[in-house]
Image: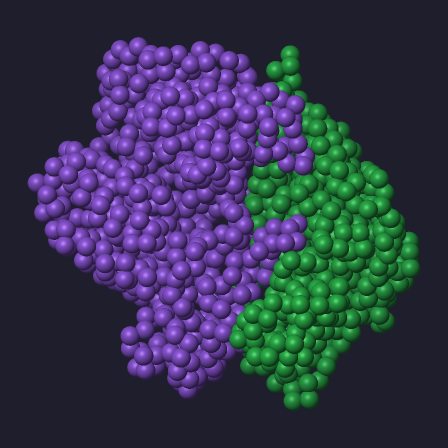
Amino acid sequence: MQQTGALTKIQRQIQWNRLIAVVEEQAQTMIRTAFSTTVREAGDLSAGIFDLQGRMLAQAVTGTPGHVNSMAESVGHFLKKFPAHTMKPGEHYITNDPWLATGHLHDLTVVSPAFRKGKIVGLFANTAHIIDIGGLGMGPEGRSVFEEGLFIPIVRCFEAGGVANETFFDFIRAGSRTPIELEGDIYSLCACNDAGAKRLVEMLDEFDMDSIDPLGAFIFESSRQATLDEIRKLPKGTYRSEIRSDGYEAPVTLHAAMTVHEDEIVVDYAGTSGLSTRGINVPPAYCRAYSCFGIKCVVAPEVPNNWASLAPFRMEIPTGCILNAPRPYPVSVRHVVGQLIPDLMMGCLHQAVPGRVNAEGSSALWNPPLRGGSQVSGPAAEVEDFEIITFNSGGTGARPGKDGLDGIAFPSGVRTMPVEATENVAPVIFWKKELRPDSAGAGRTRGGFGQIMEIGAKGDAEYAVNAIFDRVANPPKGREGGGEGAAGWVGLNDANGTPLRTKGFQIIPKGRRLLLKLPGGGGMGDPKARDPDLVKRDVADGLISKQAARDLYGVEV
Amino acid sequence: MTARLAVDIGGTFTDVAVETEDERWTGKVLTTPHAPELGVLEAVRMVLQKAGLAPADIALVIHGTTLATNAVIERKGAKTALLTTEGFRDVLALGNESRYDQYDLNIELAQPLVPRRWRLPVTERLDNTGKVLIPLEPRDVEQHVAFMRAEGIEAVAIGFLHGFVNPVHEKQAAEIVRRLWPEVPLSLASEVSPEMREWERFSTTVANAYVQPLMASYLKRLEVGLRAAGLTCPLFMMLSGGGLTTLETAARFPIRLVESGPAGGAIFSAHVARERGLSEVLSFDMGGTTAKICLIDAFQPQASRTFEVARVGRFKKGSGLPLRIPVIEMVEIGAGGGSIAAVDGMGRITVGPESAGADPGPACYGRGGAKPAVTDANLALGRYDPVAFAGGALRLYPEHARTALAAEVGGKLGLPADMAALGVVEMVDENMANAARVHAIESGKGYDGRTIIAFGGGGPVHGYRVAEKIGVKRLLVPSGAGVGSAIGFLRAPVAYEVVKSLYQRFATFDTVAVNALLAGMAAEARAVVAEGAFGAPVRESRLAYMRYVGQGHEIAVPLPPRDLGAEDIAAIRAAYDTEYSRFYDRPVPGSDVEVMSFAVTVATRTEEVLPAAPAADSPAPPPIRVQQVRDTVTGEVADWAVYDRAAMAPGAKVPGPCIIAEAETSTLVGPGWTCRMDSLGYLDLTQERS
């Protein structure tokens, strides 16, 4: 009997491992079949398996943190509308409701039931950022969610037996600038859930399991314990911090009071700025996702994401603050504010465990949505119509023992696309994309360097940018005496250096190019304590000027 | 008498195999890292003596080496500079701007092989069609030459944006460098890796430049050494794509040699598959620190064009330097006999990727290792005879294994040492099975009806359980498995692959342009192969890498090896649709298809191998002893018979559970499996019941 108990214990671990492999297969299938560059090149996606109560058992490692538990929460909303016992084999359900899913209309979430021997045994869900959903397009200009694109309530996109809901697909095709990609992506999301379901059934057969619930209980208990063990290592107390975003019409302050209890961490966002009239508002699920991520990568990075490992992190977000936007406030570019939250969490945690957090970084992605052709210039258009977005990053914050990373995404988990590939899908020319010297915050460990980008249309034709940039008026802060990272800058490449607004739709006139200077990360510790050889190396590499070496680091080169 | 000889330099051992019409001799010597040719010469001397052959009897020497890989991993290559497009000197540093581990704040990224001060911008720009937007400024190149010489640069790479579409500027820059500095080795992106995606292309090009001086000098020394030893025959090099090439080509594109050892292992498996007429196999090579798996269909190891070298986050995808070269597609898992077991914060058993290595080695070696390794777990389960391990060369200490397992695994989970051992072995088998499953998904393949070919020290031990986990019902353990890569070299064709990008849409397919491109590529590949084929017949194969317009991943579709006509287009499109549905079940309605690039491979024909005749039944030998072994599925202990492989005759059949012991490894025949020795002396395991 004792031996049987030991064997069961070992098998539970094997099954847990298998489940993580199953959701990884699910995510890989999506990447290989997706049409939108945002999924296949950038990896802006998420995938996971859920029990019939909508609790997440495992999530693919592949993916981006913005979806961490926003996708997890959304499965519960699907189940409210379509209870598990009513679901049939071959059905797939979909939504892009920012409040019931992952925070803006560009993210599609699909939920699919898995059946074994005619009985529903689990649910697979995934989320992907698609390239276009109609409306104003990716950007902050909408004044309500109705302007931001096609709104898909929770509906069935495939009926029982895997029959496509053609009425649904008719609406989808009519409502997007890129109908083929959108339809192809929806097929891809469904196919990837099917792949997961098939593997799950094989696993249940192999281990002769009728239900995933006992395994779920084991996963939840192990994960909860592991998370609590880590929380208990932190000094108890309430830690306050704030961070500022440039905002759209006015600066935005995010305020957090993080309380470490015996068995949970609670973040209270009281004191945070109110709502914006534009699409930089953050739905609460997205705020919770990046709050969790920011805490988790400091406190319990090794514990896999699931319902129980995320449960001890709780957020109290006052209604009507910019981190808890109600329907129908615009939310299209919620990332530009939301991605500052991990820096804010680390600002709090620095008071508790200073040796384990980073300085502030560039944080919000610098993704210029570019549009040209007749939708910008009308009949005078000199280039074909195009609509693209590329993902780019500034520097990350310095780390206690290491420099920040140059031009690397954090907290987002996305990848950038090759310039050659971008120039093949749209009539644009990137004239420059390289590191930005003297942009890293000085310190014993320095921040990562930002980058400079210069983008024109082919033939320097007129086109437009729907700006969503931040940290221009509020550069990343250093910690423990480290310097600020360089502030961002947005403007034209003309002789005067004409600045543009950091947010909103603006024309790049014929003969001009868009110039972007991405922020550097903040530094950590006294720059005078930095190893002079590292300063000299950066000077030799043309990343730090001789003057900065002398003035900031006290190193003569 | 004519014989062929193969030498494979690995991290620890240099393996050698020599073969005449009807006999084969093999051997191993220690690798000599400081001057690898010394180990090679020693191995050659040793095996010739063993075989009783004279140097003049050798008609061909085939060689593979990890030297290039090691130079990149250990950062011991040449001081390399990169001339690149103004505004893009940081392509190598920025990579894809992502972190391969989302939750690790202390992540390390792979540093480029060329530091920023030697990444030198040149005024020039092409657009995506290859049109010149800004002409190349010769003075920039001239100034850089002066700077590079002053800096003591030893190798130069040139890579410009869209240079793979139109190499005019790269060639112009190269001419200027050659004129001013004739002796410096040059690598052009448009020649080394002419494909879209600037990071991967530049990364491959600088890696080529980085290893070039070192490889050139090594190959020279080796050639001189072999000549001095009386071997005047041609010397061929094994490529990572599974073909052989001449010294001259190897010296031009040394980066194509990086994974030649593992490629030899895959070719070895492919040959075994051919001998047995097995059209779908999984090659499973498990050694001391890693396991490598490779899918082989129709006797061809799966090919790929992307590879990562020198991963800094051990075995983590995305943590290395990308290379875009023809390679045999393989998955490497941090799971070997030396992989260390532990318990994580969730109370889960983990295995690897940390390895006990050879020193101190697993706890049971008795050399002071206190952490339990996979070998310890196998020993504690009763799978090894402590006095007969490695042919009795290495005495094992079961009590040390148990102590380590109890301390590091059992104690933390409330399990006795034996059950902890079971957990460790099940977990490592599960990890390998999971990797195999994901790999199949990525390749659009399955395991139904597939056979595993297991080799390396651990393959035959873990093979049957991995097979059970992925649903494979047949396992083959060939002989000579200890030097599989070297034997594989002897089976490889002389081959060369050329890949080029030429964007095409099916709706507007330009057969004239495509035919011109393919003909040029074929001529290039044929010229390279002709240098080493000595008039042997060759075959040519062509592929198009295609996808739905806008989709991310390309699928390789075969093209006929001749000029295409308008009438071929529909058939190629149909082949694409079939291939796509095989991968992803659902076709996508109403989408055009685009071609991203083309590949042409020219290879000498592989020798016809007739599947071996079946062996008539013969009696099973008596077991040499009986061991008490714990089964990892049921947890029960039972008596397993142990047979001596050398005592088994072709046609002999033994039922599982049992162990078939030989000097280099043991083959485990699990409960429900049966093992029969075939006419070639291979162990053929089949699962009779599950």
Residue B13 appears in the figure: yes
Q: Is residue A336 above or below residue B266?
A: below
Query: Is B8 placed left or right of A228 in the picture?
Result: left
The x and y percentages for residue A457 are 59, 77
Please, which residue is most extreme toward the bottom here? A495
The x and y percentages for residue B173 are 38, 78
Q: Which residue shows up at 46% across the image and 19% down it? A: B382
Q: Nearer the viewer, residue B403 or B12?
A: B403
Q: Nearer the viewer, residue A165 or A50?
A: A50
Q: Nearer the viewer, residue A418 or B129?
A: A418
Chain with green colouring: A
The x and y percentages for residue B97 are 59, 61
Query: Is A263 placed left or right of A382 in the picture?
Result: right
Q: Is residue B166 above or below residue B208?
A: below
The x and y percentages for residue B383 are 44, 21
Quadrant of residue B337 within the rendered picture: top left
Q: Which residue shows up at 36% across the image and 15% down it? A: B642
Residue A381 appears in the figure: no
Q: Which residue shows up at 47% across the image and 57% down it? A: B322
Quarter of the image with the N terminus of chain B in it? top left
Q: Which residue shows up at 48% across the image and 78% down it? A: B121
Query: Is A189 placed left or right of A104 in the picture?
Result: left
Chain with purple colouring: B
